[in-house]
Image (cartoon, grey):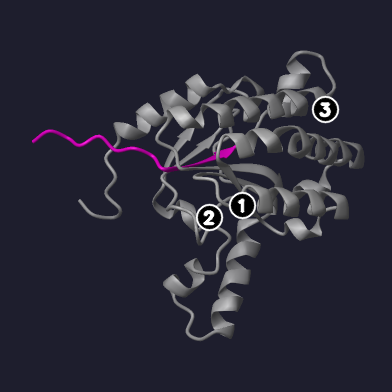
């Protein structure tokens, strides 16, 4: 029997390595983050040529607040610039923005920009989900509490209250920079996702790397606990 080729509809990426990229090039860390934003932009532009319906990116974790204040400020300013510059392109390319995490806890002007972007891209056919001020432990605890408030706590009722409730099931999770851990990202959703860990630093990650990951995924056999 010929093995059927599978396609990944929902891919998530832990974008790691901006700081190391900058250090290797003897540049300030902020330059690594700026280059990382360029990598995001190119990847989003390439989605139309892939099987992906939803791309989820780990942009800022709830633990990232522990970083030096100037680095956090740089990241927030980059977020402002990215939303402002790329929103028209999202709209033109039919990309829907979705936010995971406690993003309402960000600076008021960023919250306002995100609310505007969510409204203007609401009917896009392809989704870019961005994890902002996100932590999987908090997400699961919050979902369980909401499920309990509405009745019985079951796997289904928890899943229905996750940030990803209206997204396709996670097929593939990629982490760049050679680190081999999930760092409190999509712990529930990744239960049966395929995983790829690459040594490529995020600023150097290209659409070609993504296509290679999709090819690797297509060649794997997913059993979901079966034989």
Residue 28, given in percent of the width and then of the height, sits at 85, 22
**Image quadrant containing the N terminus:** top left
Depth check: give the residue in front, 185 or 168: 168
| 2 or 3: tag closer to the N-terminus | 3
Stretch in magenta:
1-15
Q: Residue at x 76, y 32 (%)?
A: 85
Q: Residue at x 42, y 31 (%)?
A: 50
Can you say whether 105 is above or below 47 in the image? below
Say whether residue 38 is left or right of residue 151.
Answer: right
Can you say whether 218 is above or below 54 in the image? above
Residue 62 in sight from this viewpoint: no
* Direction right: furthest residue: 70
Depth check: give the residue in front, 88 or 170: 88
What number is the disc on residue 184? 1
Q: Image quarter for residue 216? A: top left
Can you say whether 140 is above or below 124 in the image? below
Tags 1 and 2 touching, CB below 8 Å: yes
Q: Could you tell me how far apart the alpha carbons at marks 1 and 2 are, in whole angstroms?
A: 6 Å
């Amino acid at each position: 029997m010929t093995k059927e080729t599978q396609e990944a509809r929902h891919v998530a990426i832990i974008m790691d390595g901006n700081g190391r990229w900058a250090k290797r090039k003897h540049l300030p860390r902020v330059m690594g983050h700026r280059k990382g934003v360029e990598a995001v932009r190119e990847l989003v532009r390439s989605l139309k040529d892939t099987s992906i319906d939803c791309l989820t990116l780990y942009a800022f974790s709830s633990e990232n607040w522990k970083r030096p204040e100037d680095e956090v400020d740089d990241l927030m300013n980059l977020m402002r610039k990215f939303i402002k510059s790329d929103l028209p392109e999202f709209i033109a390319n039919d990309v829907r923005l979705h936010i995971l995490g406690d993003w309402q806890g960000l600076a008021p002007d960023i919250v306002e920009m995100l609310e505007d972007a969510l409204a203007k891209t609401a009917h896009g056919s392809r989704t870019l989900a961005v994890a902002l001020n996100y932590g999987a432990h908090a997400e699961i605890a919050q979902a369980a509490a909401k499920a309990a408030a509405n009745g019985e706590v079951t796997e289904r009722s928890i899943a229905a209250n996750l940030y990803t409730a209206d997204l396709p099931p996670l097929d593939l999770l990629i982490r760049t920079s050679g680190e081999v851990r999930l760092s409190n990202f999509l712990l529930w959703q990744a239960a049966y996702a395929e995983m790829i860990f690459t040594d490529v630093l995020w600023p150097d990650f290209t659409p070609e790397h993504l296509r290679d990951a999709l090819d690797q995924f297509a060649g794997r056999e997913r059993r979901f606990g079966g034989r």
